[in-house]
Amino acid sequence: MRINGAQAVLESLKQEGVDVVFGYPGGAVLTLYDAVYKMKFPHILTRHEQGAVHAADGYARATGKVGVAFATSGPGATNLTTGIATAMIDSVPLVCITGQVATPYIGKDAFQEADVVGITTPITKHNYLVKNVEDLPRVLKEAFFIARTGRPGPVVIDVAKDVFEAKLDYVYPEKVALKGYNGDYTGDPADLDAVMAALAEAKKPLLFAGGGIITSETAELVRDIVRRLGIPSTATLLGLGAIPAGEPGYTSFAGMHGSYASNMAIQECDLLLCVGMRFSDRVTGKVSAFAPHAKVVHFEIDSAEVGKNVRADIPVLGDLRWSLPLLKERVEALPENTAERFADWRAHVAKMHEEVPFGWKEEGDAIKPGALIRKVSETMKGAIAVTDVGQHQMWAAQFFDVEEPRHFLTSGGQGTMGYGLPAAMGAKVACPESEVVLFSGDGSIMMNCQEFATIADNDIDVKVLVLHNHILGMVGQWQRLFYNHHYSASELKGKTDLVKLAEAMGVKGYRLTKREELDSRLPEILREKGPILIDVLIPEEEDVLPMVPGGKRLDQMVLGGLKK
Amino acid sequence: MIQKYLLAVLVDNKPGVLTHVSGLISRRAFNIESISAGYTEDPDVTRINIVVSVESEAELDQVVSQLGKLIDVIKIVNLSRVPSIERELVLIKVASTKETRADIATVVDIFRANIVDVHPEDVVIELTGNQGKIDSFCQVLEEYGIIEIARTGAIALSRGPIPVKRM
């Protein structure tokens, strides 16, 4: 088939099963967009390249498929970088295709030229600059393979403008042949025997579920193992959904704003089974005092994560799709009464969660964030929850019941404000049958509010709740606690009317101001068809609790009035 | 205690590889003593020789694991852990006059170095050896006045018939 480079790109996307691309055109990708036009390739025009890449990310997190974004050279490509970094640290598979100036102009500081390979090297799993059209099919094949296999991540393909125009005899390769990468991570079964030996000695084992379980689609195995052993469990922020919210002995997420019971259980346990996680400082608190009594088992695909932040007494290196079936097999061979051994310990952890649950205090008419999110969780059971970044993100994690994997999409590692709206859009495009709700704040929502236009024009049915407290809430919380209440550059007491903002772009807007409206109006609004913004006024000075202050041990939580 | 290790890193001979390797070293804040790259017996493979200095085994493991994650890295072998021969090439320009030239030539002979260029005001000396030998040679030459030095960084091969790619 004799076609040009642009057609070869789209043909390859078809071969990879890509059903939609998020993007934004420009000079260097005009030929690519001409092919989009001619081939009627499904494409959603966002209103900013950052919107496109976060949308591709939301699409990928909601499905496990590779998300795809297009952008032009120079500023188009640099606008992708925040989204690429966000995907990289949370191990999200993306392929970003950027235009580059034509080959003869590369390195000449041409119009809209930027060194995209140089800029994206630290924030991609791999990247390419394509200067020869014959390389395109191979590079695309490799890019998708690299993005989705092993520990997934973003891959950037920077394509010179003239390469899109050049002709080639197109054949899509059937296999990839990379000398240094095969995506296969099979480990040593003997490691599992060491885990079983540690389990045999343990009195207080705890399972710690990370995002790797979601990525590798192994939640069922983890649930089976937890149930068979009868042990308590917790999760990281990205691990929410691995274990269902109501599971006995499961105490929601751990870390800086995690539950009291999760953090105490980590500090008390004698065996910590860490599955697909990377021990972020937000999870460990003071790292030298993390899980001081525990033997740490680390199930991990990426050898560079083992021992990077926390010592692993028993590393189990390999894909969870390899290790967890073996663990399950061994756990199932244990005596029937195994769960009894851990029953008291699990009851102790569950009791801590009952005594100090996530909570809030009602105050007059005010809408409290906890009450709002609980209400949405009940009204939209089974919805995919997406968050922006800040206080509302932590409240969403605390109060929204996540029952299934890929139902809580949040920028964990980067903490990217502005992630939410485009990511929610991508999730809804990926899963049209699912309800999608975004929790955002009056800070975060402004960072990609231009995407209300995309949502409206494409009728993407996302329910957007803005927890509006007239301040950058998390910044304000730290300023209250550690900077003598100095609200330096954090107050948002301007004239912005978020309802009008949404309506100006074609999204219906509502405002809730009183607690009673959570019952009298909210459920009805959430049941309306089509995209909606709900501007919910909440009190300004509300802390996210519990909180492990920076550098403190997990058991040194600030609880406020949470303890019953 | 700071330890140095020489890593032989086989990588794809493709554009962008050096960006990937050097970018990784800088963003992970690894301490590199020297780095050199060159063609190998296989035209598709480049060999990068990295001397890394680390404070612990864990830090060394991090360097190796992080490098290993790069898609274009094919193989990494720590040649400091196996019997191996290590060499570095240095070119040294030393100030010399009629009076000192003979003295310098004697030092050059003792170290089995070579004078590769002579000028009325200087000589250029070539020496191959391990880092210690080169360091002591430079120390001796200092009294004559070293004008400039160019060093390649260390490279190494294992002893015996098994190449790095089959280790």
Image (spheres, helix red, strand yellow):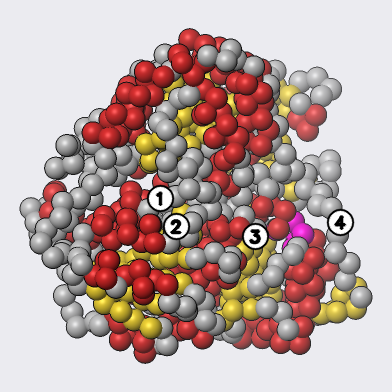
Mark 2 → mark 3, Cα distance in angstroms: 27 Å
- For the residues labelled 1 and 2, say whether their Cβ atoms are less than 8 Å apart: yes
Q: Amino acid at mark 3?
A: Val
Q: Mark 2: give few (<14), some (14-19) or many (20+) Cα within 10 Å.
A: some
Question: Residue A127 versus residue A50: which sits nearer the camera?
Answer: A50
Q: Main secondary structure of the magenta part?
A: helix
Q: Amino acid at mark 2?
A: Lys
Kindly state the secondary structure of the residue where label 2 is placed: loop
User: Measured from the top left, where is residue A289 in percent x and y?
Assistant: 31, 26
The label shown at residue A508 is none
Q: Amino acid at mark 1?
A: Asp
The label shown at residue A66 is 3
Outermost residue on the top side: it is A201
Kindly state the secondary structure of the residue where label 4 is placed: loop
Residue A140 highlighted magenta (yes or no) = yes
Residue receiving disc 4: A174
Residue receiving disc 1: A401
User: Measured from the top left, where is residue A257 in percent x and y?
Assistant: 29, 44
Q: Residue at x 76, y 26 (%)?
A: B167
On the same chain: label 1 and label 4? yes
Question: Looking at the figure, which quarter contains the N terminus of chain B?
Answer: top left
User: Measured from the top left, where is residue A31 in percent x and y?
Assistant: 71, 84
Of mark 1 and mark 3, the one earlier in the sequence is 3
Q: Amino acid at mark 4?
A: Glu
Query: Left or right of A176: which side holds A53?
Result: left
Magenta span of residues:
A139-143
Mark 1 → mark 3, Cα distance in angstroms: 26 Å
Residue receiving disc 2: A381
Q: Mark 4: give few (<14), some (14-19) or many (20+) Cα within 10 Å.
A: few
Kindly state the secondary structure of the residue where label 3 is placed: loop
